[in-house]
Image (cartoon, rainbow, N blue to C red):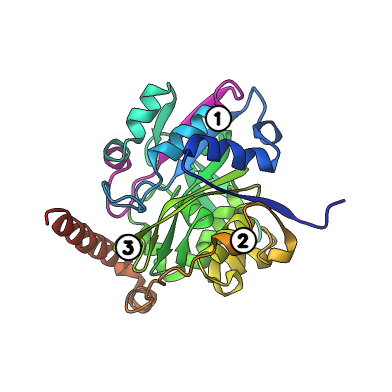
Amino acid sequence: MSKYESIVSIVRGKDVSKMVQEAVGLLGGVDRFFNRHDFAFIKPNVCGGISGKTGTFTSVEVVSSIISLLKGKVGRIAVGEADSSMYLADKMMRETGILDVAKDLDVDAVNLSRGEMVDMNVRDCYILDSIRVNRILSEAKIISAPVAKTHITTDVTLNLKNMYGILPEMKKGKYHSKIDPIIVDVAKALPPVLCIIDATTCLEGEGPFRGDTLNLDLIVAGDNAVAADAVMANIMGYDPKKIMHLRLAFEKGLGPISLNDIDVRGEDLNSVRRDFKKAPREPYSRVLAKIPGIGHLIVHYYYEKAVKSWKKKTRR
């Protein structure tokens, strides 16, 4: 019996398709996670970014590579995102190229804020004893496919924060005063079976929108969301034990955050580690905590400022 609780792979390169294939292969291959009758749902980070600014949303190359890897090995594939405080999912999936990829590869593109909803119980919760999500998520095996970014509220946004994005409400900012435990509650209800982090082009500094892009040329995959996030956070120069939602997830038994408990395969951690510029936690986190009712307004205001700043830079 292995002494490790989870496996995480790190692959470096330029050919994204080969990198995704190798990263999943190091975990045991697609067949370890899916059979031919399964429904695979891919959840990229789309509405948490700015269209046109690479590093703020999961790249279409990573999404298309995951779809291609699954083709012929599962019964059905879909990719999707929920509406956010900033944008409608349909608009962002169109602008980031996700809709075109889905159409070209003949898979469904789903707005998780539309359609039939179901309530899912959260056992041993922190805050939410149930969550309402799109029925499609209760029927599928989920692949979390975030882009690696810093975040002003949660330090990093990786798999666990990406899964928080499945909540169908547009005004998710109402949860931001207690976002760390709520992230864990969502992860308990719907843990992804496979995680593939897009760390080809990342975001450092004032993420998740206003930061600076950083090329790592990495794919980081894992069989556990908490473990994969812990490894990626370490690559980014963070101590996973000091990231609140990772520590809370570990305390609920959702996965390991100590690298001693994770079988890291592929590239050596020391060879790929970068000291990301960290996201400032003030003033947003304190304001959101004190006045939770206006959380979504603050998030939207912050996002609009980031978009204007980005457009101004691109016009130069």
Q: Which residue is mark 1?
A: 69
Residue 196 on image: x %, y %: 54, 45
Report the front residue among 304 and 150. Answer: 150
Callout in the foreground (2, 1): 2
* Residue 82 picture quarter: top left
Q: Is residue 135 visible?
A: no
The Cα–Cα distance between marks 2 and 3, rounded to whole angstroms, is 22 Å
Name which residue lies at 68% across and 43% down. Answer: 27
Name which residue lies at 30% across and 37% down. Answer: 90
Name which residue lies at 50% across and 35% down. Answer: 17
Q: Which residue is mark 2?
A: 269
The Cα–Cα distance between marks 2 and 1, rounded to whole angstroms, is 25 Å
- Callouts 1 and 3 close, C-beta under 8 Å: no
Badge number at residue 157? none
Badge number at residue 212? 3
Three-letter code for the amino acid on which mark 1 is drawn: Leu
Q: Secondary structure at mark 1?
A: helix
The residue carrying pointer 2 sits among few (fewer than 14), some (14 to 19) or many (20 or more) residues within 10 Å by Cα, namely some
Name which residue lies at 38% across and 75% down. Answer: 285
Residue 209 on image: x %, y %: 31, 60
Q: Secondary structure at mark 2?
A: helix
Span colored in magenta: 69-92
* Residue 228 picture quarter: bottom right
Closer to the N terminus: mark 2 or mark 3? 3
The number of numbered discs placed on residues in the rendered structure image is 3
